[in-house]
Amino acid sequence: MTDLKSIDKTYIANTYARFPLELISGKGSIVKDETGKEYIDMGSGIGVTAFGIADDVWKAAVSEQLGKLQHMSNLYYTEPCALLAQMICEKTGMKKVFFCNSGAEANEGMIKAARKYAAEKKGADYYTIVTLENSFHGRTLTTLAATGQDHYHELFQPLTPGFVHAPANDLEAVKKAALSNKTAGIMIECIQGEGGVIPLEEDFVKGLALFCKEQDILLMVDEVQTGNGRTGKLYAYMNYGIEPDIISTAKGLGGGLPLGAVIFGEKTEYTLGAGEHGSTFGGNPVCCAGALSILSRIDDSLLAEVKQKSKLVFDALQGAKGVEAVSGMGLMIGVKTVKPAAEVVKECMEKGVLCLTAKDKVRLLPALNIPEDVLMKAVETIKAVCAEDEA
Ligand SMILES: *Cc1c(COP(=O)(O)O)cnc(C)c1O
């Protein structure tokens, strides 16, 4: 074990089961370890480095802002966060943005807004948020409560009250859960990410949107993982032809710097007032300058490329030896393998390809601009590993 690995094991809290790999540097979709060995990065963090590692355009935007003003409190106006909010609203038709630093924090803001909206509209007892079984919404006590997977809850009781879980793709069950509680909002991931890269069914999502509208229950979409071009649309809800009342996003938005956002539609744009929510670091000018460079490049042609590359991956892996199923959308792809996913990931790493897992799937979240030849080289490695007999 190198010094660094033992220092890390001694001093870093035990919350992460790290791979035995120290990463030093990279460029685009290639990353190098401490021995100089190169890997194709099929995870981009966990869907974070949207345009790869040390992307030149992003780096220039970030560096320029870093030399001007790295932080000011939210007591003052700064240009990058205002322009980024404008860009997000113009590209989505939503009305206002609140910036924070992570996905869980974005979901917390979204939940606060939903509770206040419902309290004002219907009464303070309308605080329940219905979420889906097998969902993932973060690791704070409130977003854990929102997460519809019991094993995350067990050790951390009591969680924030007011969350009810209902089965995904069962519209009647979700309606029943919402109507038998005094419900403020229904919160979904259009594609369950940590849950195994499982897209929700279109009829279910459309039915849910209609129900929410009829009942004046807020439709809350967690786009932390699916957002910012990942699924071949700017936001995953756009694949379903629905209009959320409120959206949370993070991961890919900052291109590798911490940035989250709550995006408010018409119903909630004025819900949170001065002093009712805030974040010291939220809307950081360096993070926002980088995000502006990212979001301005997620245009129709980039999104068309994401879809086209997605099709190449699906075509190569569907029906391949050792592959049971391929799920997902765009460059958010889950591969159900015959071998345990963790073993596939380990063998791919040895062969120079870094993949992720999600439950029992191998999860692929490469950079949106990964070159086609690099992508297909990684896919060939994954295919070969899946086809080999178990070690
Ligand atoms: C990753 C993730 C979160 C949590 O984001 P953090 O930045 O880790 O707090 C929330 N929701 C979804 C759907 C995610 O994928």
Image: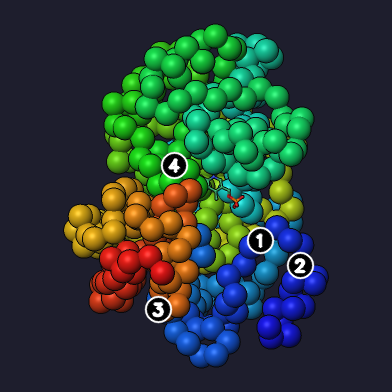
Q: CA distance from mark 1 to mark 4?
A: 22 Å
Instruction: Say what amino acid the circle numbered 3 marks.
Output: Lys
Q: Which structural element holds mark 4?
A: strand
Q: Which structural element holds mark 1?
A: loop
Nearer-the-camera pick, 22 or 265: 22
CB atoms at circles 1 and 2 under 8 Å apart? yes
Residue located beneath label 4 in the image: 192
Instruction: Say what amino acid the circle numbered 4 marks.
Output: Gln
Residue located beneath label 2 in the image: 12
Q: CA distance from mark 1 to mark 2?
A: 9 Å
Residue located beneath label 1 in the image: 16
Q: How many marks?
A: 4
Ligand 1 near label 4 (Cβ, under 8 Å)?
Answer: yes
Residue 114 seen in render: yes
Residue located beneath label 3 in the image: 351
CB atoms at circles 2 and 3 under 8 Å apart? no
CB atoms at circles 3 and 4 under 8 Å apart? no
Instruction: Say what amino acid the circle numbered 1 marks.
Output: Tyr
Q: Which structural element holds mark 3?
A: loop
| 322 w.r.t. 269: above or below | below
Of callouts 3 and 4, the N-terminal one: 4
Ligand 1 near label 3 (Cβ, under 8 Å)?
Answer: no
User: Around disc 4, counting alpha carbons within 10 Å, would you say few (fewer than 14), some (14 to 19), or many (20 or more)?
Assistant: many
